[in-house]
């Protein structure tokens, strides 16, 4: 059994079931690490909560919408400005934070009135905005508030507003993954099909599971435009609330992040019979394959080849320059889940790098199946990793660069290892052809920065003094 118990986990031996090392000839149907279950007490998890999965990852990206967080102000503040998803609506969605600001007295006497007051105040402050998401949090769910009833009242009173409620208290589920699920299913149930889009092309798609991190959506939109394909909605990069209500009219759902948004694609298949096509959009080879698949679906193979030829001509030389310098460098990917399987082969095939350790915060079994199938023999695959495990990995394997979040990233910097923000990127977009070059450039800048050798000299300088 290729499972491993880290030395740091001796007092929580159950962690052994969450750490896997791929062996030669290993078949992922025989053994997978456990995942998508409760964090083991004593393990300092890096996971987020259900509310965070709904708000920070999916809902908060929508560009014309007030995001009302029904709970103590900290829940709102802590999911504000930690993710970079711009929009062409003057970044409205990044500028403000809203909360019903519940206090102890509301916990005792109920917070519905407070919520109603906050919603009306927010609409008054932003008279042009007529759409709102309301999120529950641990506290307001525990006291049994009924935000849906409050929102129906406000909709009736104001007449021209539309409000969507996500029931995503932090304690629900085992990670942020539960919040993705709740939002997907809720949106399908309450909002899809309540508005009709203007159809401008016979080729229509939804791009599902792309959140315009540092402009990813703009890249995908440009490829679609060049192929003459109308994107009804990006779920949810640079999108409006009303575009998302029209998703039922697409002829194809193109799914990038299957973990956070596969559910809505499945529901659209079940209810409206819209086919689901899973693609990878990071990496040269993968984006080529994605464009070819979409082209083949609509009979637009020539258009796809044109886009590919243009982009390859522009970016292949640049990518090769970085490949020369990144070949053989060792990488860790410690993010949420899907980026492990999206990136591992892309980094190896496009750039000749070696992915030596991967950790997923909340990936499910299917994510581990994919990443282990695509990953290398000898690589360490961790579910719900903790900091001590990360340090032990780094004691045992050499890594030239690590994709992770700023929290763990700042820790590895102290070991003089560069990190790239694997969630919000350093200088994206990272999707598509230009994105692959940007990603390579950021890794090159990280690995070859003279800062690391200078930082490494400090102790000796001190000794000499
Ligand atoms: Fe999908 Fe995402 Fe990810 Fe994700 Fe995330 Fe993310 Fe991620 Mo950070 S939606 S699952 S909950 S690709 S925020 S944009 S990078 S952990 S691997």
Image (cartoon, rainbow, N blue to C red):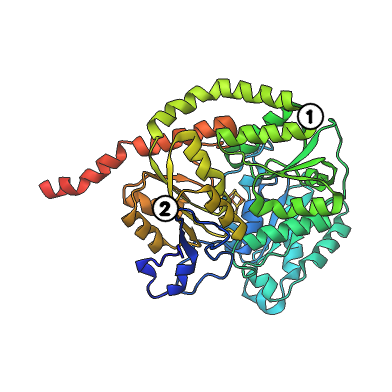
Q: Mark 2 packing: few (<14 Cα in 10 Å), some, or many (20+)?
A: some
Residue 388, image quadrant = bottom left
* Mark 1 within 8 Å of ligand 1, using the beta carbon: no
Instruction: Name which residue lies at 50% across and 72% down.
Output: 40
> Which residue is found at the position 31% from the left and 56% from the top?
395
Find the distance from the CA under tag 1 to the CA under tag 2. Answer: 42 Å
Decide: is 19 above or below 238: below
Label 2 element class: loop
- State the residue lying farthest toward the left: 464
Q: Residue at x 87, y 46 (%)?
A: 195
For mark 2, what is the residue? 378
Mark 2 CB within 8 Å of ligand 1: no
Front residue of 52 and 112:
52
CA neighbours of label 1 inside 10 A, class few (<14), some (14 to 19), many (20+): few
Residue, disc 1: 299
Residue 108: name its quadrant: bottom right
Res 91 label: none
Taking the image as shown, residue 309 lies to the left or right of residue 390, namely: right
Q: Position of residue 143 (x, y in %)?
A: 69, 76
155 relative to 179 in the view: left or right = right
Q: Residue 69: give x, y in percent of width and height.
A: 67, 60
């Amino acid at each position: 059994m290729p499972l491993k118990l880290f030395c740091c986990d001796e007092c929580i031996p159950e962690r052994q079931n969450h750490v896997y090392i791929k062996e030669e000839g290993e078949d992922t149907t025989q053994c997978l690490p456990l995942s998508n279950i409760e964090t083991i007490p004593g393990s300092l998890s890096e996971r987020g909560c259900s509310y965070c999965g709904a708000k920070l990852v999916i809902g908060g990206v929508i560009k014309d919408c007030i995001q009302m967080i029904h709970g103590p102000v900290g829940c709102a503040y802590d999911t504000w400005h930690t993710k970079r998803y711009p929009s062409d609506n003057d970044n409205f969605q990044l500028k403000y934070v809203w909360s019903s600001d519940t206090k102890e007295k509301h916990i005792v006497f109920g917070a519905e009135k407070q919520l109603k007051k906050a919603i009306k105040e927010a609409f008054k402050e932003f008279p042009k905005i007529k759409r709102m998401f309301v999120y529950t949090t641990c506290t307001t769910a525990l006291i049994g508030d009924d935000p849906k009833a409050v929102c129906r009242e406000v909709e009736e009173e104001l007449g021209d507003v539309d409000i969507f409620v996500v029931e995503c208290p932090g304690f629900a589920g085992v990670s942020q993954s539960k919040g993705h699920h709740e939002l997907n299913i809720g949106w399908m149930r309450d909002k899809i099909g309540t508005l009709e889009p203007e159809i401008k092309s016979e080729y229509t798609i939804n791009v599902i599971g792309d959140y315009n991190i540092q402009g990813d959506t703009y890249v995908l939109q440009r490829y679609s435009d060049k192929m003459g394909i109308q994107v009804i909605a990006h779920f949810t990069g640079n999108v409006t609330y009303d575009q998302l209500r029209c998703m039922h009219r697409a002829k194809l759902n193109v799914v990038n992040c299957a973990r956070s948004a596969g559910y809505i694609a499945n529901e659209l298949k079940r209810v409206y019979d819209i086919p689901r096509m899973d693609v990878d959009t990071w990496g040269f080879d993968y984006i080529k394959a994605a464009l070819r698949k979409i082209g083949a679906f609509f009979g637009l193979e020539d258009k796809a080849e044109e886009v590919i030829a243009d982009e390859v001509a522009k970016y292949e030389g640049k990518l090769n320059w970085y490949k020369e310098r990144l070949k053989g460098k060792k990488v860790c990917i410690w993010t949420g889940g899907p980026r492990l399987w999206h990136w591992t082969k892309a980094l190896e095939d496009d750039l000749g790098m070696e992915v030596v350790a991967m950790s997923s915060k909340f990936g499910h079994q299917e994510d581990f199946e994919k990443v282990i199938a695509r990953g290398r023999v000898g690589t360490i695959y961790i579910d719900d990793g903790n900091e001590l495990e990360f340090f032990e990995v780094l004691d045992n394997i050499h890594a030239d660069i690590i994709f992770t979040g700023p929290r763990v990233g700042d820790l590895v910097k102290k070991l003089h290892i560069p990190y790239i923000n694997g969630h919000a990127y350093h200088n994206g977009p990272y999707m598509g052809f230009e994105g692959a070059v940007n990603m390579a450039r950021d890794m090159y800048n990280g690995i070859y920065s003279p800062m690391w050798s200078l930082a490494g000299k400090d102790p000796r300088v001190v000794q000499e003094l």
